[in-house]
Structures are given as structure tokens and as C-alpha cells.
Image (cartoon, helix red, strand yellow):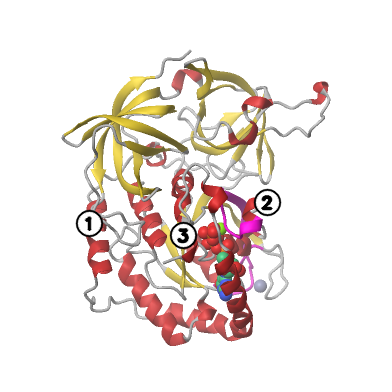
């Protein structure tokens, strides 16, 4: 459906992405949109309050039937298991002193390509997350984007007007008060970037599914991203019906009903649907209110051994930096449990290849940073940058993405071969045709998403729902954790199911 998915790509996926047609069409709609904004804001609010949420009598269409089926499968899943859901929770609440200078929660922006995830991220944070030259040139998100903001409230105004990200109330000018610091992980929607989306999903505490009002519901990646949420057991989802100003009221109501009908077959069935216009900042206050009410900060247990999933890694030195001023490598990621302090001795697994073995990396935390500033102690919530004394050549250009940081004695094993119980979806939800998912076969190549890691491997055993895969790149993960399984169909990696790790062969390492 999306004209943008025309070009098939694999390893060089980014190189073939094209968005020019959509950019052109959106440009013209944007002009129309501008004219419509004034009225939209009120219209959108009205729709939100009054659109009936009752399910319309389902019309019999193939898409509907197939969607229902595949979701039925995913509801059978056990309720636990990504690195995220695996972490034990306690009711112990961190004091606000402990979480100063840091976001409390990371929310994902998910949904079909071009539906407005990055624009909404900008509306909420002031920062447009597509910063790489290739993303700007092509007009689409390619990597995971990241931006932080403060949710604040005006002591004088009523809800939803009182909710803002500004220090002064845009409505009455009064000084606003801090509610929460919130981080956004902006996933790319293009179908060839599903692996990147899955990597981002592992660091989301909740998600906002962005759906364009001016397109049919559901588009393939609306379905696939939501299936990914089902797989990781994420029920904290808010749906945004975006680009509302591009539709007449009648069209918007129809789209709203279609959306409600679609989500009623998924784990987002109880999610609120908020009509917005990201580009015109309409109903952003209502969205903040909904986030505050529906996506609370998850309980964290600061006493568990710390673990961070690496989502990016850098060399922060400028070219030509003198050796004495050279800074050590930096790893950025999401702390999934426990807390890290400056001075901690840490290990990074699986580490780096040396010959035909991998060697764990041992280093020390020399600094901790969030987007809000320097930290002495870092807790779960948002992305944290850990400054180390590693050779920056080891961390440059995202080289350590997918690895885990922790204490050497408490990190999970690193595996060369992974064994898991497999659960397949009935349909390939991410493709237009939604073909049936075929059984996993010996010797086929599959891609596994394990935390922020993606690794491809060959099936070496299949028996009664159990599968073993020889991995090209080792991954570090605990047994019991849930992983996403993708298969290459028509040269694109498509989500086909999930697995629960039961064991494997540990990495030859040191
Ligand atoms: N009219 C209108 N256009 C919008 C709105 N939100 C986003 N857009 C436009 O839609 C296009 C795509 O927006 P993005 O924010 O890049 O969409 P995205 O979902 O991040 O796209 P990918 O990351 O590539 O999947 C841009 O041209 C935006 O200006 C909206 O509320 N109304
Ligand atoms: Mg984007
Ligand atoms: Zn006010």
C-alpha cells in the first residue's frame, strides 16, 4: 500500500529507501492542513469526547478475518518475558531526589511509515529526531530517534489545557510545575526497518501508536508494530489518530471506528484513541493528559544487579584530538534493572571478536549522563550514556549496539547457539497479503531480536515447538526471556512469531 516500500533491500536497506513521492503528496496536504487547523483543534477534541466507542457490526473482509486470527494466536502468549518484562518488579518507589536529572519513563513512537511519529516526537519535545543526513535527505526515519521532555502542569488552568511541556503556561502565562521527565524512542516505520523497530521495542516502557487519519486502517506496519507490542507483552499503548485535519468530520469518525475495531482484536483493545494533529500541535495537551493517566512510571527495583541494554555507542572525540585529551568510549542505552554509579567496574557482553572467539570487555564507569545532565547514579528511565575508559575505536559508530552492560558476576550468559520454544503467528501481519506463516524448517535462516540485539542464524534443530539456532553473532540473554522471530519473505524481514529462551550453547569466550 505504501508506495515507499517498493524497493527491496537487505543489508544495505538504508540505501534504497525512497520517500520522494510521499514527501511531495504530504507537502500539498500540508498546505490544506494549515488552513484547516483552527477548526481542527476543536473538532478533534469533540471527536475524542463524543465518538462512540462501540464496535460497529463487523463487515466481512479478508483483512479483518486474518487480523483477528493472527491476534488470537498472539493472545495465547505467556504474559512475561522480554528483558523488560523479565525484570522483577517491586513496589519500592524511588524518591524524586534519586531520579533527578533523568527521565522516569521511555515511551516508544510506533506505527506505519509516514504517519507522523517523528513529527509528534517533535511536537512533544521540541526536537525533531531525524538528525542523520540520510534521514533528512530521504525524509524518513532510519535509526532509532531519541528525545526527552518535561511534562508540566499549570496550577491555574483546567485539564486538558493545563498540561504542557513549557515552563510558562501557554494559556495564562503562569509558571508551570514539573510532573515527570519523559523520554521518547522514535521507531522507524518503513517496512524494511522492522529489525530496528524491534530493537527499540525492548527499551520502551509504553508506546504511542501513531495512525494517520487519511489512510485505510490498519496499514501493514500499524499491524506489525502492534503485533510486536503483543509479543513483548506490552499493554501500555495509547493510540493517536494523527493528521486529523486532513479529514472531514465524517471521515474522521469513520476512521476512528475502524481504528477501534482493529485494536479491539489486539492487546491494545483498552487503549484510548486520541485525535491529534502533530504538525499543528492540536490536542497535544490532551495527549499529555492521557499519557499521565494511562502510562504510569513502572515500579523499579534498585536492588537488583544493574543491567543496561546498549542502544547506541560512540566515539565522542573530535578528529585530531590530542592523545592526552582523548576521551574513552561511550555506550548509550536503557537500564532495565538496578542502578549504576560512577566508579563502578563493569563488563560488556558479548564483547569483541578476537580471532574466532569473543572476549568480554571489562572497564570502569568514568561518567554518567542523561539528556538532562550529569549523574552520579543512573536508574532505569530514558537513555543513559556511560563514559568508560575503553578504547573509543571499540565503541565508535554503534559498534556495541545489542550488547549488555552489567557487573561481571551477575550478567546473563552469552550464547553461540540459542534454544527456544517457538510460537508462530498465523499470518505474516507485516505484509500486504498477510500470507500464512509456514513452519520453521531445518537449515533456514531466521533473525532473532533479543533485547536491543538482532542476530541472524541457521536452524540446526526443530522438534515439537522447540528450535535451536546457530548464531552468526553471539547474544547475551537470560533463559525465560522472550525474543521476536523474523523470517525473510520477499527479501524483507517479517515478524513471524516469538520464542522463549530455554538454553543453548554458551559462547567460547574469556
Ligand atoms: N497534515 C499533516 N501532516 C503531518 C502531520 N504529522 C506529520 N505530518 C507529515 O507527514 C510526513 C511524515 O511525518 P513523519 O513525522 O516523518 O512520519 P514518521 O511516522 O516519523 O515516518 P517514518 O519515521 O519514516 O516512519 C511529514 O511530511 C510530516 O510533515 C499532521 O498532523 N498533519
Ligand atoms: Mg520518523
Ligand atoms: Zn495556565
Measuring 53% from the left and 80% from the top, which residue is drawn there?
246
Say which residue label 3 marks.
Answer: 6
Quick one: 227 or 353, which is closer to the camera? 353
Say which residue label 2 marks.
Answer: 133
Q: Quadrant location of residue 323?
A: top right
Q: Which SS class for mark 1?
A: helix
- Relative to 274, say whether 125 is above or below: above
- Relative to 480, say whether 494 is above or below: below
Distance of label 1 from label 2 (alpha carbons): 41 Å
The part of the chain drawn in magenta is 136-165
Whether residue 343 sits left or right of residue 75 in the image: it is right
Residue 146 seen in the figure: yes
Residue 509 part of the magenta-drawn span = no
Distance of label 2 from label 3 (alpha carbons): 22 Å
Question: Ligand 2 near label 2 (Cβ, under 8 Å)?
Answer: no
Please provide percent x and percent y for residue 31: 63, 80
Please provide percent x and percent y for residue 108: 49, 53
Q: Nearer the viewer, mark 3 or mark 1?
A: 3
Whether residue 365 sits left or right of residue 22 in the image: it is right
- Relative to 15, say whether 478 is above or below: above
Question: Which of pointers 3 and 1 lies earlier in the amino acid sequence?
Answer: 3
Quick one: 22 or 454, which is closer to the camera? 22
Measuring 60% from the left and 39% from the top, which residue is drawn there?
384
Please provide percent x and percent y for residue 378: 59, 36
In the picture, the disc for residue 72 is: 1
Measuring 58% from the left and 42% from the top, which residue is drawn there?
383
Quick one: 483 or 283, which is closer to the camera? 483
Question: Which of pointers 1 and 2 lies earlier in the amino acid sequence?
Answer: 1
Please provide percent x and percent y for residue 325: 81, 25
Amino acid at each position: 500500500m505504501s508506495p515507499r516500500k517498493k524497493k527491496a533491500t537487505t543489508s544495505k536497506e538504508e540505501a534504497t529507501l525512497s520517500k520522494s513521492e510521499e514527501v511531495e503528496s504530504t507537502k500539498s496536504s500540508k498546505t490544506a492542513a494549515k488552513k484547516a487547523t483552527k477548526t481542527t483543534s476543536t473538532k478533534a477534541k469533540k471527536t475524542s469526547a463524543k465518538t462512540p466507542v462501540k464496535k460497529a457490526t463487523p463487515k466481512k473482509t479478508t483483512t479483518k478475518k486474518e487480523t483477528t486470527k493472527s491476534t488470537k494466536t498472539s493472545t495465547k502468549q505467556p504474559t512475561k518475558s522480554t528483558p523488560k518484562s523479565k525484570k522483577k518488579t517491586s513496589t519500592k518507589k524511588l524518591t524524586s531526589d534519586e531520579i533527578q536529572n533523568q527521565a522516569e519513563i521511555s515511551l516508544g513512537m510506533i506505527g506505519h511509515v509516514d504517519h507522523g511519529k517523528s513529527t509528534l516526537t517533535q511536537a512533544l519535545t521540541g526536537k525533531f529526531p531525524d538528525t542523520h543526513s540520510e534521514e533528512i535527505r530521504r525524509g524518513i526515519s532510519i535509526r532509532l530517534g531519541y528525545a526527552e521532555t518535561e511534562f508540566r502542569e499549570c496550577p491555574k488552568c483546567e485539564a486538558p489545557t493545563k498540561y504542557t511541556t513549557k515552563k510558562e503556561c501557554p494559556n495564562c502565562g503562569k509558571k508551570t510545575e514539573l510532573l515527570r521527565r519523559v523520554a521518547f524512542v522514535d521507531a522507524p516505520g518503513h517496512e524494511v526497518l522492522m529489525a530496528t523497530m524491534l530493537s527499540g521495542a525492548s527499551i520502551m516502557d509504553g508506546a504511542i501508536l501513531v495512525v494517520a487519519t487519511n489512510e485505510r486502517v490498519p496499514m501493514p506496519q500499524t499491524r506489525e508494530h502492534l503485533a510486536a507490542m503483543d509479543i513483548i507483552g506490552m499493554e501500555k499503548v495509547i493510540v493517536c489518530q494523527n493528521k486529523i485535519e486532513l479529514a472531514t468530520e465524517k471521515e474522521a469518525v469513520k476512521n476512528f471506528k475502524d481504528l477501534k475495531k482493529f485494536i479491539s482484536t489486539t492487546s491494545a483493545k483498552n487503549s484510548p484513541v486520541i485525535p491529534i494533529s502533530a504538525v499543528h500541535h492540536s490536542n497535544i495537551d490532551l495527549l499529555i493528559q492521557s499519557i499521565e493517566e494511562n502510562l504510569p512510571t513502572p515500579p523499579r527495583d534498585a536492588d537488583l544487579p544493574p543491567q543496561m541494554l546498549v542502544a547506541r555507542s560512540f566515539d565522542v572525540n573530535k578528529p585530531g584530538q590530542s592523545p592526552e585529551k582523548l576521551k574513552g568510549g561511550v555506550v548509550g542505552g536503557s537500564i532495565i534493572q538496578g542502578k549504576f554509579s560512577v566508579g563502578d567496574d563493569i563488563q560488556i557482553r558479548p564483547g569483541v571478536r578476537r580471532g574466532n572467539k569473543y572476549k568480554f570487555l571489562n572497564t570502569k564507569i568514568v561518567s554518567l549522563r542523561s539528556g538532562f545532565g550529569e549523574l552520579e547514579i543512573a536508574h532505569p528511565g530514558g537513555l543513559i550514556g556511560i563514559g568508560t575508559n575503553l578504547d573509543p575505536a571499540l565503541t565508535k559508530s554503534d559498534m556495541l549496539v545489542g550488547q549488555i552492560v552489567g557487573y561481571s558476576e551477575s550478567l546473563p550468559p552469552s550464547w553461540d547457539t540459542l534454544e527456544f520454544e517457538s510460537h508462530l503467528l498465523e499470518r505474516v501481519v507485516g505484509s500486504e497479503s498477510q500470507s500464512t506463516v509456514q513452519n520453521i524448517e531445518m537449515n533456514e535462516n531466521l533473525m532473532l531480536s533479543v533485547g536491543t540485539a538482532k542476530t541472524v542464524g541457521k536452524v540446526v534443530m526443530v522438534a515439537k515447538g522447540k528450535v535451536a539456532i546457530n548464531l552468526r553473532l553471539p547474544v547475551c540473554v537470560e533463559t525465560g526471556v522472550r525474543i521476536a522471530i523474523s523470517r525473510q519473505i520477499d527479501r524483507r524481514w517479517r515478524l513471524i512469531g516469538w520464542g522463549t529462551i530455554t538454553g543453548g550453547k554458551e559462547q567460547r569466550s574469556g
